[in-house]
């Protein structure tokens, strides 16, 4: 049912209970009622004494409500949360409290306490680049990156006014000290890792002495090279050094190849000489033993032993000769035996009878020679 329908009674929101429901609402009266209510809430006086007493009671309740509301807002304003990777530092009337605030939900009275929250796990970085003078009076361009985290939140916020500026200045001081104590080759070649470690140690000592609350986790040398103005000349020097090292390596490889060969050749000659010496000594000892045995046999049968030695000697001589000259007894002529031709003829004919005949002739010749030598010895003996 609408408020202006029959039976609506006193449901007129504009307060026109005594007027005709068919007419429009009285806006002036509604505004006056609203002003009266606002005046009562803020201590305004009414038209009579009863209205003034009711306004005072409303004013006291409103003040209590406002006080409770302000107290609630004050308490709510002191609630704050610290994340797992963060730590909080409390300043009470400007004085820092010794204990850090850990992760979780906390409350501190506003205006009395001020809380600064810092991230103690985030890895931050600082880059630095500068031209520096080395120990051998050369200029190098060095750039590095320092990675660090906050080690102590109170020290980071209190001990140093600008900890990041202090970190930058300490980095430059440590880097200049280390580079100034090293040679140019060490800075731009294989000594970069050692320089980074030394800079990190020295920088951490500086920050620890400052009480900056910063922990240096890593120092990386991003670039270390000569200045751009001298880059071409430096490249020429490096190329010359590389050529020098290449020639040294080639000479070393050649020496490592030649020296073992020479040592092996010398060892082989020594072993050959040792073998020759042993062989000659053994042969000489064998000849000496053979001579002693022949001497013993010769003392028992001189003629037989002498003939045997002569026959063996002649056999050795004829074995290595292809032609034989034989002096015929009682004549001035000499017999010539071409043994090489006879051997070739026998091999060409291939007849067993011819071979046997040749053997008989040679045996007969041997007997004749033996008889001739015996006769000659007897004649000499007579």
Image (tube, helix red, strand yellow):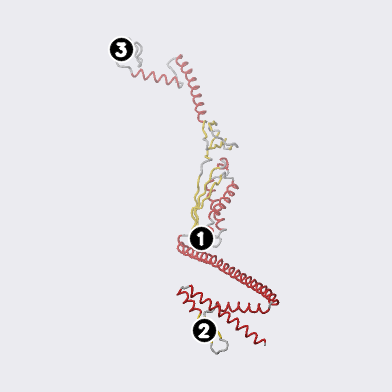
In this rendering, the label closer to the viewer, 1 or 3: 1
Q: Which mark is residue 139?
A: 1
Q: Which mark is residue 98?
A: none
**Mark 3 neighbour density, 10 Å: few (under 14) some (14–19) many (20 or more):** few
- Residue under the point 49% across and 58% down: 225
Report which residue position mark 3 lands on.
Answer: 5
Position in image of residue 361 (x %, y %):
53, 79
Position in image of residue 203 (x %, y %):
57, 50
Spatial distance from mark 1 to mark 3, Cα to Cα? Answer: 100 Å
Residue placed most toward the observer, 381 or 62: 381
Residue placed most toward the observer, 300 or 367: 367
Secondary structure under the numbered disc 1 in the rendered image? strand
First of labels 1, 2 by sequence position: 1
First of labels 1, 3 by sequence position: 3
First of labels 2, 3 by sequence position: 3
- Residue under the point 59% across and 47% down: 208
Report which residue position mark 2 lands on.
Answer: 336
């Amino acid at each position: 049912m609408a408020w202006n329908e029959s039976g609506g009674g006193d449901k007129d929101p504009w307060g026109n209970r005594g007027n005709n429901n068919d007419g429009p609402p009285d806006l002036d009266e509604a505004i006056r009622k609203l002003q009266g209510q606002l005046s009562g809430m803020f201590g305004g006086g009414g038209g009579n004494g009863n209205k003034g007493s009711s306004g005072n009671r409303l004013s006291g309740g409103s003040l209590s409500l406002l006080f409770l509301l302000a107290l609630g807002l004050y308490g709510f304003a002191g609630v704050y949360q610290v994340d797992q990777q963060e730590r909080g530092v409390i300043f009470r009337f400007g004085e820092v409290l010794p204990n850090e605030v850990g992760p979780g939900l906390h409350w501190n009275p506003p205006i009395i306490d001020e809380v600064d929250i810092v991230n103690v796990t985030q890895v931050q970085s600082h880059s630095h680049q500068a031209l520096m003078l080395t120990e051998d009076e050369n200029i190098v361009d060095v750039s590095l990156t320092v990675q660090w985290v906050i080690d102590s939140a109170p020290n980071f916020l209190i001990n140093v006014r600008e900890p990041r500026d202090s970190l930058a200045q300490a980095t430059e001081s440590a880097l200049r000290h280390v580079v100034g104590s090293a040679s140019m080759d060490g800075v731009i070649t294989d000594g970069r890792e050692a320089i980074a470690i030394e800079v990190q140690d020295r920088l951490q000592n500086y920050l620890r002495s400052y009480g900056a609350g910063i922990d240096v986790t890593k120092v990386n040398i991003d670039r270390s090279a000569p200045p751009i103005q001298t880059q071409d000349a430096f490249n020429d020097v490096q190329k010359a050094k590389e050529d020098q090292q290449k020639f040294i390596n080639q000479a070393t490889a050649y020496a490592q190849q030649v020296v073992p060969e020479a040592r092996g050749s010398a060892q082989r000659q020594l072993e050959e000489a040792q073998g020759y010496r042993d062989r000659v000594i053994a042969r000489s000892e064998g000849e000496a033993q053979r001579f002693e045995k022949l001497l013993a046999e010769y003392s028992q049968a001189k003629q037989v032993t002498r003939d045997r030695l002569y026959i063996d000697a002649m056999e050795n001589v004829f074995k290595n000769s292809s032609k034989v000259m034989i002096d015929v007894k009682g004549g001035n002529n000499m017999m010539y035996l071409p043994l090489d031709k006879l051997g070739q003829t026998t091999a060409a004919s291939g007849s067993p009878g011819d071979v046997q005949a040749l053997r008989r002739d040679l045996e007969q010749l041997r007997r004749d020679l033996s008889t001739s030598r015996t006769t000659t010895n007897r004649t000499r003996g007579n």
